[in-house]
Image (cartoon, rainbow, N blue to C red):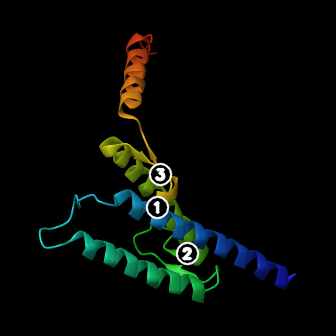
Amino acid sequence: MAGSCRMIDEFAKDNLHGRLRRDREALLWKLDGLSDLWATEDETRDQIIGFYRRTWEHSDATITALPLDAPGHVPWWPEPCPNTNLFAVMVHVLGESIRHAGHADILREGLDGRTGLRAEHEKQIDDEARAAYCAKIEQAARSAAPIKAY
């Protein structure tokens, strides 16, 4: 039984780690060619992305070296959660990465119409079709019955 538990743990860890790697790359792709909104005057885009990639390397080494039940401590997590394990941290980081990639996707589509999970899946939205679709949504919203307060 212990061997099968280790196999399941390794499968779960590999699966979570693979998704995290995929979503990190997706986030960088969505930022490709954009300036940095919250960077200081002396920070460059390359410096910020370099820092992000160095954190990946550290995270990847930690994930590779430790079992899923390895204890951890996240001091800014509320009680009783500061004492946690690698599995919970990986699930949390994956959720955060997906959420931020979604935000970047919304912003990117609004800026230039580029959508997709990764560069190889990129779709360019037809500006005329997009404008017509937005007008259709706006018209539907304006013609909808007002919501009654109860």
Is residue 116 positioned above or below 71 on the image? above
Residue placed under numbered mark 2 in the picture: 84
Residue sitting at x 50%, y 63%:
23
> Which residue type carries mark 1?
Ala
- Going by the picture, which residue comes out furthest to the left? 41
Tag count: 3
Residue 92 can be seen in this image? no
SS for tag 1? helix
Left or right position of 80 against 130 = right
Left or right position of 33 against 29 = left
Q: Which x, y percent locates residue 127?
A: 36, 33
Q: Which x, y percent locates residue 90?
A: 55, 71
How crowded pointer 3 is (Cα within 10 Å; few <14, some 14-19, many 20+) is rated as: some
Left or right position of 20 against 75 = right
Is residue 127 positioned above or below 90 on the image? above
> Which residue type carries mark 3?
Glu
Mark-to-mark CA distance, 2 and 3: 38 Å
**Frontmost residue, 129 versus 43:** 129
Mark-to-mark CA distance, 2 and 1: 27 Å
SS for tag 2? strand
Residue placed under numbered mark 1 in the picture: 26
Considering only order in the chain, which callout, 1 or 3, is on the residue closer to the N terminus? Answer: 1
Q: Nearer the viewer, mark 2 or mark 1?
A: 1
The image quadrant that residue 41 belongs to is bottom left
Residues at discs 2 and 3 in contact (Cβ within 8 Å): no
Residue placed under numbered mark 3 in the picture: 122
Residue sitting at x 58%, y 66%:
19
The image quadrant that residue 141 belongs to is top left
SS for tag 3? loop
Left or right position of 118 against 130 = right
Mark-to-mark CA distance, 3 and 1: 11 Å
